[in-house]
Image (cartoon, rainbow, N blue to C red):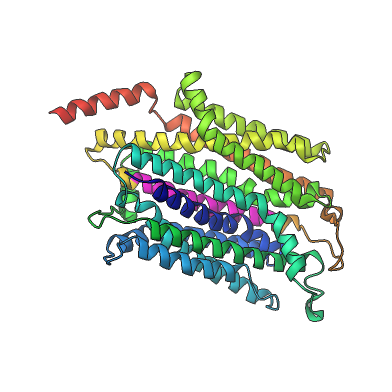
């Protein structure tokens, strides 16, 4: 049985891993577009291509890890190699030379972000795949997986809450004076944030390496464990032959596109719409409440709806999507009537993030049910293949969402306020037109609403695995296995 040391160290690895992921996923667009001035359209293309490439790279890395044989095991060497290289690339990505011209910054963003994705995959695939290598099956394995997912949520929440609080502080402490030749390009707050991100990322990268090192030293692999990997051809064959898996995968894409569009743009909403001298404090509060709500929704809200209210999973899914749509409408309405306090916006934030938490659980359940359906229909269990699709399509959705958000930013033309480098208490919203503010509100609410409605229509039309159907399939499989 696993001891406290092994469990804690594995959870610590998840904290570091998702700190790094959240920093890249949430702030790379803001860093290059808003601070360095890279074209939003160019960033959209870079982010889309990189994430699609990264999604296809996952199965390749799985094959490489599966074929690795060393005296240290097959997983830990890649964990260390991937972590060290990813930490270096992460720092370089958020330490772009400010003297580069526009074309140079686009090239720098493209190279570092794509390489970051490759090196992250090098450690992410072995991290999740190594669970069977040091656990027994059943409750022990399920418990560790749950612990790791929860710790990953903690790591992501830490970055969401602290980044825009710590970055300005570090920028003022270590940024120095803007060089005269760069003063016109990086006035005031831009220079502070530029340097703040560099030093903040350095700290995150160091913690990432430290946490992974502790994990690798604390956990011993079983050398006899085999790792099953899915090829791209197997993924698409499983989808084509399993209409219910296809339906769930499409639902995952549209639900995550809606969420990621909002998460990419919410920092711009707080900075350029709500504004105020302390906009970053409001943004941190919003993220803290939203992140906590998402975790609690998975742990408490879903069991409450399922076990106490006795709702079936399909109805819970519709309730969850309804909560999210209501949240988006509430956010748009509050912003449109001029609500300026952060506190009221916590209500739509809670609705949207609670929906995201519930959907994380339900989609996993739906995918599991499609495995049984596929076995009954095709006489073949594609369990590993179908579940590997979840990571694939989530990355694809994040790339699509980043592309949409980038196109919106290029049209809205949001810009930093020009000010002296030592000036404080800047209200960035003062320099933004009402048309741009309204456009931002509509993109981050109405487009997600449209996408969610589309997802519900796809799901309602194609999905047939209700509780009764799942029970029937289970009974038929039981009879088949007994023969």
Q: Say which residue appears at 65% left-offset and 35% top-offset.
A: 350
Q: Measuring from the top left, give residue 42's x and y in whole percent.
A: 62, 65
Q: Say which residue appears at 62% left-offset and 67% top-offset.
A: 94
Q: Measuring from the top left, give residue 10's x and y in whole percent.
A: 43, 51
Q: How many labels does the image show?
A: 0
Q: Please, which residue is most extreme toward the top here?
A: 309
What is the quadrant of residue 333 in the picture? top right
Horizontal side, residue 52 vs residue 224: left or right: right
Is residue 56 among the parts visible in the rendering? no
Is residue 402 part of the magenta span, yes or no? Answer: yes
442 versus 104 height, above or below: above
Q: Give the quadrant of the C terminus.
A: top left
Q: Say which residue appears at 60% left-offset and 39% top-offset.
A: 292
Q: Please, which residue is most extreme toward the front here?
A: 4
Horizontal side, residue 289 vs residue 146: left or right: right
Write down the region rendered in magenta.
386-409
480 versus 223 height, above or below: above
Is residue 276 part of the magenta span, yes or no? Answer: no
What is the quadrant of residue 428 in the picture? bottom right
23 versus 292 height, above or below: below
Q: Please, which residue is most extreme toward the left here?
A: 483
Is residue 407 among the parts visible in the rendering? yes
Q: Measuring from the top left, give residue 224's x and y in whole percent.
A: 22, 55
Q: Give the quadrant of the N terminus.
A: top left
Horizontal side, residue 280 vs residue 214: left or right: right
Residues 307 and 238: in front is 307
Q: Mostly what secondary structure, the magenta segment?
A: helix
């Amino acid at each position: 049985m696993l001891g406290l040391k092994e469990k804690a160290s594995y959870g610590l690895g998840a904290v570091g891993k998702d700190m790094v992921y959240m920093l890249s996923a949430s702030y790379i667009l803001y860093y290059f577009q808003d601070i360095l001035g890279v074209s939003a359209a160019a960033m959209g293309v870079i982010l889309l291509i990189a994430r699609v490439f990264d999604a296809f790279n996952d199965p390749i890395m799985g094959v490489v890890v599966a074929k690795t044989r060393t005296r240290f095991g097959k997983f830990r060497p890649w964990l260390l190699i991937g972590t060290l290289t990813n930490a270096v690339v992460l720092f370089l990505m958020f330490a772009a030379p400010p003297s580069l011209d526009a074309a140079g910054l686009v090239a720098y963003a493209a190279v570092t972000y794509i390489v970051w994705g490759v090196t992250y995959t090098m450690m992410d695939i072995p991290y999740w795949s190594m669970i069977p290598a040091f656990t027994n099956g059943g409750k022990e394995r399920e418990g560790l997986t749950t612990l790791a997912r929860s710790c990953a949520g903690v790591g992501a929440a830490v970055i969401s809450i602290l980044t825009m609080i710590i970055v300005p502080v570090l920028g003022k402490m270590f940024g120095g004076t803007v060089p005269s030749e760069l003063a016109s390009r990086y006035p005031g707050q831009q220079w502070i944030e530029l340097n703040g991100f560099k030093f903040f990322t350095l700290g995150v990268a160091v913690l990432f390496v430290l946490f992974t090192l502790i994990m690798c030293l604390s956990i011993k692999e079983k050398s006899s464990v085999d790792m099953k990997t899915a090829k791209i051809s197997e993924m698409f064959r499983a989808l084509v032959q399993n209409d219910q898996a296809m339906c769930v995968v499409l639902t995952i894409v549209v639900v995550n596109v809606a969420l990621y569009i909002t998460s990419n743009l919410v920092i711009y909403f707080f900075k350029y719409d709500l504004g105020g001298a302390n906009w970053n404090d409001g943004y941190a509060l919003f993220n803290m409440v939203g992140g906590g709500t998402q975790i609690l929704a998975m742990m408490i809200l879903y069991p409450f709806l399922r076990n106490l209210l006795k709702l079936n999973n399909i109805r819970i899914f519709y309730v969850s999507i309804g909560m999210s749509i209501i949240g988006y409408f509430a956010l748009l309405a509050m912003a449109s009537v001029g609500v300026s306090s952060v506190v009221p916006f916590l209500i739509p934030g809670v609705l949207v993030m609670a929906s995201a938490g519930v959907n994380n659980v339900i989609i996993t359940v739906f995918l599991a049910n499609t495995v049984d359906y596929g076995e009954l229909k095709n006489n073949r269990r594609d369990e590993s293949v179908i579940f590997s699709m979840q990571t694939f399509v989530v990355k694809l959705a994040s790339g699509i969402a980043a592309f949409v958000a980038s196109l919106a930013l290029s049209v809205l033309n949001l810009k930093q306020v020009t000010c002296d480098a030592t000036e404080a208490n800047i209200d960035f919203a003062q320099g933004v037109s009402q048309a741009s503010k309204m456009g931002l509100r509509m993109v981050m609410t109405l487009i997600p609403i449209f996408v969610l409605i589309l997802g519900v229509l796809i799901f309602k039309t194609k999905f047939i695995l209700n509780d009764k159907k799942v029970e029937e399939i289970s009974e038929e499989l039981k009879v088949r296995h007994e023969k």
